[in-house]
Amino acid sequence: MKIVIVGAGYAGTMAANRLARRARGAEIVVVNPRPEFVERIRLHQVVAGSGTAARPLAEMLDDSVTTRIAAVTKIADGSVALSDGGALEFDRLVYAVGGAPSAPEGAVDVGAHESAAVAAERLRSLPDGASVDVVGGGLTGVETATEIAARRRDVRIRLFSDAPIARSLGAKARAQVAEVLAGHGVEVVRQRWSGGRDAALTVWANASRVGELALQSGLEVNDAGRVMVDDHLRSVSDPRVIAVGDGAAVPGSRMSCQAAIPQGAYAADLIAADFTGRSHKPYSVAFVAQCVSLGRSDGVVQRVHRDDSPASLWLRGRTAAAIKEQVCRSTVHTVRAGRYSWKPGAA
């Protein structure tokens, strides 16, 4: 069996390493535009200069997995065309391309490693008293604003959002976030960012777009460009394609490593079952918590219900920050090992 995995993020790398263990004898090729695995949940640290987020794919992928550094330009009938002029045939394809930068002109996107590095360089060169705008009041925006504030106390930071700040959290957790933002002197501007302001740096923290590969390849997608899937995460227009992560329209999911990792594991198990002629149960998701860092020494951990709706505030402060850091480290270990205890209804 020839297996092509498009994308080497959390979902794609997990799928590759798990398949290396569960579908021995299969040819597994990971296609990725860059030779590094990027921890997207650390990109706000890259912007602030408080951490790194990239490590060589050679350190992350099983030795039996072949890596092709290129972009996939089209998925056709059992084959993919590559940006280097080559092509790969497949019996199964894991579509794990993830999200795409969406920053408008004048802003720098925190969602991609290259743009986060650009933002970091610009931030380092800012003089005392310069203004930094962070656009997006979700968890990425909150983490970015507080991370920068903790590192650069000499700049003025404004957090723009026309929606409630950290609205996915419960009331107590949101109150804690607001207290930390205020303590760092972050000005919350409750309106849509319209550009043309006096900020020396604008960081875009609205993760909303996905790549156009699926649409351009003729796969059925939803209005946001995500691949439409059945209850086994197979593309409804080509069952040889299993879509996972940010680029898949999985009901009840959200853009996060907490969703991508179990989906990547499930895709590997599904393909391994096909490889041996066994059946496999439908995919279902259940979230556990939302972990938010507020700088290196503060944070909140919010328990959630299965559907990701907020339950109780579990931890805050230094303990929560330590938990978030441990989650980041264990996520890399889990993906590298390709080991995840998936069962229906558990993510």
Image (cartoon, rainbow, N blue to C red):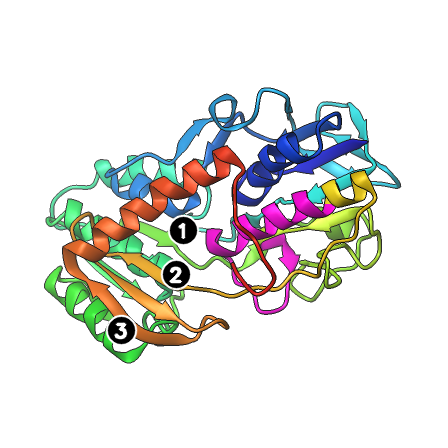
Q: Residue furthest bottom?
A: 171
Which residue occupies the foreground of this view, 173 or 221? 173
Where residue 248 appears, as percent x and y from the top left, is 65, 56
| Mark sitting earlier along the chain (1/2) | 1
For residue 142, side relative to residue 182 (left or right):
right
| x 74%, y 29%: residue | 82
Q: Amino acid at mark 3?
A: Arg
The answer to whether 53 is drawn above or below residue 259 in the figure is above
Q: Are marks 3 and 1 in contact (CB under 8 Å)?
A: no
Pointer 1 residue: 107
Range shown magenta? 246-270
Q: Are marks 1 and 2 in contact (CB under 8 Å)?
A: yes
Residue depicted at x 53% and y 60%: 208
> Which residue bears the numbered disc 2?
195
Residue type marked 2? Gly
Residue placed under numbered mark 3 in the picture: 174
Q: How many other residues sit within 10 Å of disc 2, few (<14), some (14-19) or many (≥20)?
A: few
The reply to whether discs 3 and 2 touch (Cβ–Cβ < 8 Å) is: no
Please, which residue is most extreme toward the right here? 77
> Could one spot residue 312 in this view of the protein?
yes
| SS for callout 3 | helix
* In front: label 3 or label 2: 3
At horizontal 52% and vertical 56% (from top left) the residue drawn is: 259
Secondary structure category for the residue under label 1: loop
Sequence-earlier tag: 3 or 1: 1
